[in-house]
Amino acid sequence: MNRTLLIIKPDATERDLIGHIISRLEKARFKIVAVKMLHLTGQQARAFYAVHEGKPFLDALVEFMTSGPVVPMVLEKDGAVAALRTLVGATDPAKAECGTVRYEIGVDIQKNSVHASDSDENAAKEIAFFFDNVGV
């Protein structure tokens, strides 16, 4: 079994879609290993998205990710990273395949409702960012 991280973003928490997203994850046979709700500070959001430092969209991303509660969770499944990326769809909901989470509930490229780790290496880093002693 592999683990990955998913974050339910502020646009989805604001629209009361937490249960809907969790239901989609459970139907896709992901096991939820850890979950919590929190408000990211600007410093936390900037640290989490440090890979985008210097890019023109970073400030807007930090502002968005601190605009409301987020729900990070650790998910477990064989091939978890790839399976989750398939389930959530393309970053831009307008380009996401029908049936994916982002196609269904994403608003735009920034308000795309969820973040999903893009590699096993990043999953390990991202899980450690939010959860102590969970590991991958």
Image (cartoon, rainbow, N blue to C red):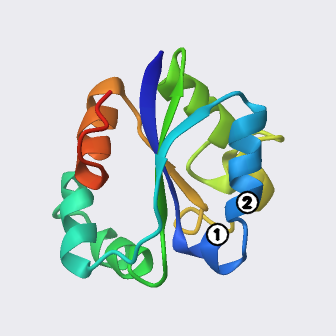
- Observer-nearest residue: 34 or 4? 34
Q: Can residue 37 be spotted in the picture?
A: yes
Amino acid type, residue under disc 1 in the picture: Ala
Say whether marks 1 and 2 touch (CB < 8 Å).
no
Percent from the top left, x then y, of residue 71? Answer: 50, 62
User: Which residue bears the numbered disc 1?
Assistant: 12
- Mark 1 lies on a secondary structure that is helix
Name the residue located 36 percent from the left edge and 82 percent from the top edge. Answer: 63
- Whole-angstrom CA distance, mark 1 to mark 2, is 10 Å
Q: Which label sits in the foreground, 1 or 2?
A: 2
Q: In the rendering, which numbered label is found on residue 19? A: 2
* Residue 33 left/right relative to 30: left
In primary-sequence order, the first of circles 1 and 2 is 1
- Observer-nearest residue: 18 or 60? 18
- Give the vertical position of 31 relative to 51 (above or below): above
Percent from the top left, x then y, of residue 56? Answer: 28, 70
- Give the vertical position of 86 relative to 61 (above or below): above
Mark 1, other Cα within 10 Å: few <14 / some 14–19 / many ≥20 = many
Amino acid type, residue under disc 2 in the picture: Gly
Name the residue located 61 percent from the left edge and 62 percent from the top edge. Answer: 113
Percent from the top left, x then y, of residue 103? Answer: 75, 51
